[in-house]
Amino acid sequence: MKRFILSFIFFFVSTLFLYSENRYEFSVDLTKCVKDKLLVELMTPNLNSNEVIYRLPKIVPGTYEILNFGRFVSNFKVYDSLGTEMEFEKLDVNSWKIINAKKIKKLSYEVEDTWDTEIKEPYVFEPGGSNFEAGKNFVLNPHCLFGFFEGMKGVPYQINIIRPSDFFGACSLTDVVSKGNVDTYSIVDYKELQDAPMMYNVPDTTVLNIGETQVLISVYSLNKISSSKFISEQISEILFAQEEYLGGVLPIKKYVYLIYLTSTGGISGSSGALEHSYSSMYFLPEMDQKYLSQTIRDVSAHEFFHIVTPLNIHAEQIGDFNFNDPQMSKHLWLYEGTTEYASGLVQIKYGNMSLSDYLKVIESKVSGSKGFNDSISFTLMSEGCLKQYKDQYSNVYQKGALIGMCLDIQLRYLSKGKYGLQELMVDLSKTYGKNKSFKDDELFDQIVKLTYPEIGDFFHNYVEGNKPLPVKEMLELVGIGVADASGNKQISIGGISIGLNTATNRLMIVNTEAMDDFGKAIGYQEYDELIKFNGKKLTVNNSQEVIGGFVQNAKEGDELLVVVGRRKSDTSKTKKIKLKAKLFPVLPAASNNLIPFTNATDEQLKLRTDWIGKH
């Protein structure tokens, strides 16, 4: 008996040791970045098949676009234990097949960054891509560099990052050991690895403690226009409000904001952020802090709320995400729509936004949703967002948010103010959770079980069906009506947000979300530098005089000529482009046409208070 026990213990320990070594071991040296490329080396896990397929993702969660990250890989090589190169076959842009797999010891390949590339479209939205700026900054989204063998995404990973001695790596991963200038991360599987972007640079960090949750804010701002201290001051109130919104306790122990502030814009032509379970990656204009403040608050409020969905509420398609043959869930109204809605609701409900400003947010959603095909049901659009309905995806931030609002108000109305979307999200998190997915076709029935039969009709009519959302009817329940907007048209220069490009000291268009019909007609784009305005050279010092003077005297039919500097990418030269159009009256994209009733009933006022707090 004792001998058996000793033998068993020896066998168990030996097996455990072998298993602990059966892992992917990647190494990347940031000090050896050449021509915006990094060498990735992999000591392979144990491979027991005659042939294997090594893959990089075709798509990753949160992007809703086929991006084929294998496009950025070159000089792919395979070695056996003697260091001899082995043959392989490239199956497609993301996949390499290797025979005699049991002999494989090492893979190596070079990866080009996505932020500064000559590779043709589709360009990668910067927060989901990679940036290799030797000696300055490295944004490492793991799916850009690290892959997996088919059928082996569940094997553990070890990532070794060799960094410049003065660099700090910000990341949500907690199992990390730093020795000298090497950071070693241990990760459970590919899903956890892919969910954890890293940003390396000379540190500018601030830590906030929100209840039992530690929040790390890491900022890279080349021209020091902003800092982690300033940004932490902007989002701390929102974070405390979100803690209260979620019942007083955040469902995570650590969260990381990775914020890259750009002075020149990016190759994708967009700015914003990409969510992860325990972090979010931001790519935003390096503009004056007074302009940056509300942008940071709005975007961070949205991304942080993704700790609820899809982290704790998600379909099987997300819980077991297929990186190379993705199947889309039909519930984008939940993942992005309710998250976008909650990011505004939390600000007004806990005193960080006025009623007037919040009504403008709702109006912008209503206005924005009109640019999409409202005859397509939202569930159908969600399932087809990668293919036939790709051009409709952005409506998740417009109509998707309005679906959340209408659902919230109806829940409050049916429960006499006691139960809304806020409480529903908590209940759904308890019903499911990080490791328990829902079936796509069962979610609506589950929500009805938690709420009211009328909510089933709501989903059938407005989410699965294509009936127009009852925005007007829902707002009337809380004593808010729509004013007659017919007389509100006015002359406009475009409804654009203007900031400063500190690298060139020129005024720059930093946001076009509220751009009106004239702005679209003349053809503004984000990151256009304003060189001349109506024939006059434009500078920081004379901008108010030149632009303000024109607007004051402008009339319908006058021609406006604007010369802008536009670049296709960070490395391309600025090209002067003339934009011109004749002025015509437009409705501001977010004109304040929603107004509280002056004769609202006590019942309407109470429901409004239950919905957004007392205002």
Image (cartoon, grey):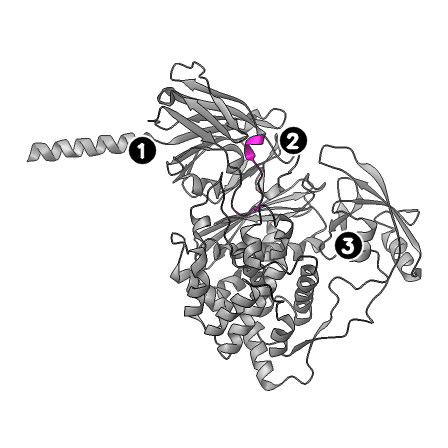
User: Rounded to the nearest whole Å, what is the CA distance between mark 3 and mark 1?
Assistant: 56 Å
Residue 472 in view in this figure: yes
Of tags 2 and 3, the one toward the viewer is 2
Judge from the rendering whether residue 576 lies leftward or rightward of residue 153; answer left or right. right
Mark 1 secondary-structure assignment = helix
The answer to which of marks 2 and 1 sits earlier in the sequence is 1
**Three-letter code, disc 2:** Ile
How many neighbours does mark 1 have within 10 angstroms: few (below 14), some (14-19), or many (20 or more)? few
Judge from the rendering whether residue 483 lies leftward or rightward of residue 493; answer left or right. left
- The question of residue 605 being in magenta is answered with no
Judge from the rendering whether residue 551 lies leftward or rightward of residue 36; answer left or right. right
User: Rounded to the nearest whole Å, what is the CA distance between mark 2 and mark 1?
Assistant: 39 Å
Dominant secondary structure (helix, strand or loop) of the stretch shown in magenta: loop
| Residue at point 75%, 39% (across, down) | 503
| Residue at point 48%, 26% (across, down) | 96
Q: Quadrant of residue 72?
A: top right
**Three-letter code, disc 3:** Ile
Q: Nearer the viewer, residue 92 or 22?
A: 92
| Residue at point 43%, 13% (across, down) | 84
Q: Are marks 2 and 1 in contact (CB under 8 Å)?
A: no
The answer to which of marks 3 and 1 sits earlier in the sequence is 1
What stretch of residues is rendered in magenta? 59-71
Question: Would you name the residue on which mark 1 appears?
Answer: 20
Q: Position of residue 14 (x, y in %)?
A: 23, 30
Q: Nearer the viewer, residue 377 or 90?
A: 377
Q: Position of residue 586 (x, y in %)?
A: 82, 62
- The question of residue 62 being in magenta is answered with yes
How many neighbours does mark 2 have within 10 angstroms: few (below 14), some (14-19), or many (20 or more)? few
Question: Would you name the residue on which mark 3 appears?
Answer: 496
Q: Quadrant of residue 263?
A: top right
Q: Nearer the viewer, residue 608 or 477?
A: 477
Residue 257 in view in this figure: no
